[in-house]
Image (tube, helix red, strand yellow):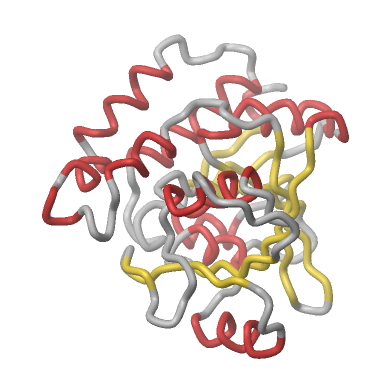
């Protein structure tokens, strides 16, 4: 893919401008969590833009689970927070998960109508690049959502650069080291004992596992409701 076909955008404003095949990136932690939730057997994920929408969906479907955060903190009344480590060793086969977050999910809701959307994380970056290459779109928007969709963060920028490097066939040689080094920047909160009740240490490891999963998560809309669905590599 040609470099000029790939655009890296930032934060909520970037999501609102995105065109073509759009990858909304949230490494710490929304779209890493969704990878681990699918690995735990979840059948589908329903992104919800607001906490009120999330509760309304659960009221309508009491059997659905609900996960998410605001300012990183688990929302009272939810089954899960936004920690991938909560999904590492459980069996959620066949379950539906409602998911609302301060950055990643806000990006999904901000993408202009009619664009194809994937979620983005380091966990499945290579699968995302493979999917894009097979689709061969005219334009790709890589949207790094940052903290609360308002402040750029190193992990989302790194993920965008990594996906871009794969698409132009100049892969980052030091991606593993750069991911590990995130512990000294935005990832340092996972190593702060005072914050471990919000940002578990294990989450850092799970979020920085490069290319751990060979599937993408595609987001579609039906009658105003978003759905984030796993697509395995053999199906694209």
Q: Position of residue 193 (x, y in %)?
A: 13, 49
Q: Is residue 31 visible?
A: yes
Compared to residue 169, the image places residue 135 above or below, namely below
Query: In this rendering, would 232 be left or right of 144?
Result: right
Quadrant in the rendering for residue 156:
top left
- Which quadrant is home to the C terminus? top right
Please tell me in which quadrant of the rendered image residue 188 appears. Answer: top left
Q: Residue at x 70, y 58 (%)?
A: 228
Number of numbered tags placed on the structure image:
0
Q: Nearer the viewer, residue 69 or 126?
A: 69
Quadrant for the N terminus, please: top right
Expressed as whole percent of the image width and height from the top left, the position of residue 29 reads: 43, 50
On the rendered structure, is 61 left or right of 67? right
Image point 45% across, 61% down: which residue?
103
Q: Quadrant of residue 102?
A: bottom left
Q: Please tell me whether residue 180 is drawn above or below residue 81 in the rendered image.
A: above
| 67 lies left or right of 198 | right
Q: Provide residue 93's location: percent of width, then percent of height.
A: 71, 54
């Amino acid at each position: 893919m040609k470099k000029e076909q790939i655009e890296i955008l930032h934060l909520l404003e970037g999501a609102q401008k995105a065109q073509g095949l759009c990858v909304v990136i949230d490494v710490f932690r929304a779209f890493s969590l969704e990878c681990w939730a699918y690995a735990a057997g979840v059948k589908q994920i329903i992104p919800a833009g607001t906490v009120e929408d999330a509760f309304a969906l659960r009221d309508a479907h009491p059997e659905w689970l609900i996960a998410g955060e605001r300012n990183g903190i688990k929302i009272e009344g939810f089954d899960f927070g936004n920690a991938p480590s909560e999904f590492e060793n459980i069996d959620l086969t066949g379950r539906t998960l409602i998911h609302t977050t301060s950055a990643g999910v806000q990006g999904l809701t901000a993408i202009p109508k009619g664009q194809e959307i994937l979620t983005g994380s380091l966990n499945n970056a290579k699968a995302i690049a493979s999917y894009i290459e097979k689709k061969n779109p005219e334009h790709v928007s890589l949207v790094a959502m940052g903290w609360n969709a308002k402040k750029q963060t190193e992990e989302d920028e790194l993920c965008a650069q990594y996906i871009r490097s794969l698409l132009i066939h100049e892969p980052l040689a030091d991606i593993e080291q750069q991911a590990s080094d995130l512990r000294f920047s935005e990832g340092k909160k996972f190593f702060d004992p005072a914050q471990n009740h919000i940002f578990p240490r294990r989450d850092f490891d799970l979020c920085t596992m490069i290319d751990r999963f060979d599937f993408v998560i595609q987001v579609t809309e039906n009658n105003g409701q978003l759905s984030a669905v796993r697509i395995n590599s053999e199906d694209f």
